[in-house]
Image (cartoon, rainbow, N blue to C red):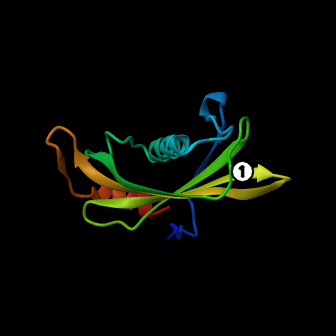
Amino acid sequence: MERIKLQLSSQFPFSTALQIRITDINYGGHVGNDTFLSLIQEARQQFLYHYGYTELNFSGVGLIMVDAAIEYKKELNYAETVKISVAALNFNKIGFDLHYLLEVESNGFLSVAAKAKTGMLCYNYDLKKRMPMPEEAFQKLTHV
């Protein structure tokens, strides 16, 4: 079986720390795949907010996630704090990718819990159509 192998950015201009809650734990006793997506969604919201944006107001357009990939490396457990680093790259006329590096402290060292990528498309929710990448947002996200 072929496995996903993500090549992430070497630089992450933003990071946040999130603590794993009891409601994040699944029947296997660890964070499930759906919660990994929720964790990166929270990190994405904080990343955008850091630059003065939201998913519904990205320099005058909205954003919609068009794809996602996660490469799991380590379980996340209750009360652990996960550091999630975020970088924007691979810009084109209508969108870009976000890369996420999820790390957890273990024995005084950070170890990779997961690598993830989401494809973000500029979108007008009222017209239900894709929109051009705003130049202002491109400049903010590429000049870090």
133 lies left or right of 87: left
Residue 41 place in picture, x, y as percent:
48, 43
- Choose top left, top right, bottom left or bottom right for residue 115: bottom right
Looking at the image, which residue is at 39% across and 43% down? 53
Of the pair 77 and 87, the residue shown nearer to us: 77
The image shows residue 38, relative to residue 96, as above or below, that is above
In percent of width and height, residue 80 lies at: 73, 40
**Three-letter amino acid code of the residue under disc 1:** Val
Residue under the image location 45 percent in, 48 percent down? 51
* Residue 109 falls in image quadrant: bottom right
Q: In which quarter of the image is residue 95?
A: bottom left
Name the one closer to the observer, 62 or 67: 67
Looking at the image, residue 39 sits to the left or right of residue 49; the answer is right
Q: Name the residue furthest left.
A: 127
Residue 26 vs residue 15, the one in the foreground: 26
Position of residue 5 measured from the top left corner of the image (x, y, whole percent): 53, 69
Q: What residue is drawn where x is 80% and y is 52%?
A: 106
Crowdedness of circle 1 by 10 Å Cα count: few (<14), some, many (20+)? many
- SS of the residue at dot 1? strand
Asked whether, in this view, residue 102 is left or right of residue 52, the answer is right
Residue named by callout 1: 104
> What x and y, as percent, mark residue 125?
21, 40
